[in-house]
Image (tube, rainbow, N blue to C red):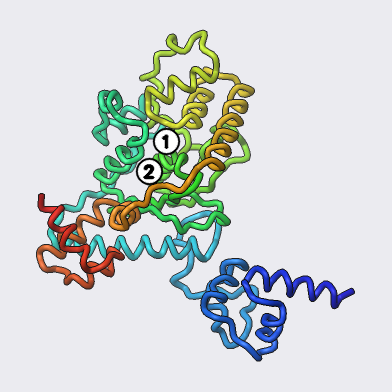
Amino acid sequence: MLAKKSDTRLSKAADAIGVSSDTLALVESGKHCLTLNQLRNAAEKYDFPLGYFYLSSPPEKSFKPIPDFRVEPSLHGVDHYRLNLEIKKCRERRNIFIDLAARLEMEVKPFQLLPDESARNVGSLIRERLGVLDTDFNTLKFEDTYAYWKNIIERDGVLVYESQYIPDKSGVIGAAMFYDTYPIILIKRGGNFNERKLFTLLHEYAHLLLGKSAINDAGAQVVRRDDPSVDGLEARCNALAGEILIPAEKIDLSVYTGLAAADKMELLSRTFKVTYTTAAVCLRKLQLISNTEFIHLLDLRRKANETKSQSKGEGARIPRENLMRLDMGRPMFKTVLEAYSVGLLDIFDTSKILNLRVKKIDGLVSGLRR
């Protein structure tokens, strides 16, 4: 019986890695080696850093890869080595940006904390700080809303990075890393997470306004302040993000009288260019819908997203330079190109930092000068 269980485990492991059971048996006995791609498959399947396979002996349960792979001090959330790598990458990019900004003699603006989150009309006060105008939303297309908010938050001195490599297994869709100057927001990009990006962005910005670093999971967006199972800080950031996106004093409650819950969600979403889910959360906070209606609306959105995900075809290919601009944010991307254009960086260092081919760099600098 034990032999059969062992054979089953060996067979499953071999299938996961992409080799035969006989080959894996030889590997385990030390008579054969896996290829690099097979090692990568094994690392991905069993959630180990690739470097584990190069150790002289199996790691103990308490083994940690290297100190630099640790979670950012003061952050709270899921400890996952690939997530930690993305956080490490954000720190390194920030250090490069600060160095180049100093050498280019760019003005450094200290990040201002929120004086009082309980202040009346706090959402409108923050929108005023960011230079948000109500008229902006009259012509703003829904698909451009995230880019709009990202741009104005970057103008407030925040480095907004995106990554498609944050593992789903971590449950994390965003992180906030507070610093007195150039704090960081990290956003998960791709798949079904794109619909959550706007609220996640504002949620992380709320963390920075409170001066609190944190990692936030995929369930944070739809949790209300009065839910006792949610950490108080996350609930405060939810409320603050919602208030920035949809300030309560800007809502004419009489317009929503007599409308069905779904129609209220549609109207609020269209007016403030937010997702249906964000609109539903706001409607519940304002008590314009009941808790039963709120749960029903969220269930409708979940089903709609599942249907959209199943029917989604292959999207248009995005140029790599545009992807890297998303990953690094406009301030970082632009500063690196400016440093190259004035001779602070050579073309090879610029290529390495931006993760682009050398032949792309001069064309991007020409576009910057237009």
Of 215 and 174, the residue lying toward us:
174
Residue corresponding to mark 1: 241
Q: Which quadrant is the N terminus positioned in?
A: bottom right
| Left or right placement of residue 12 versus residue 363 in this view | right
Point out the tag, 1 or 2, that comes first from the N-terminus.
Answer: 2
Instruction: Looking at the picture, tell me which residue is in the foreground, 313 or 252.
Output: 313
Query: Picture coordinates of residue 225 (x, y %)?
Result: 54, 33
Question: Does dot 1 land on a helix, a strand or a loop?
Answer: helix
Residue drawn at (35%, 53%), measured in percent from left and top?
161
Q: In terms of secondary structure, where does tag 2 sit?
A: helix
Residue position for label 2? 205
The image quadrant of residue 10 is: bottom right
Residue 57, percent from left and from top: 62, 86
321 sits left or right of 74 in the view: left
The amino acid on which the numbered mark 2 sits, given as a three-letter code, is Tyr
Q: Residues within 10 Å of mark 1 (few under 14, many from 20)?
A: many
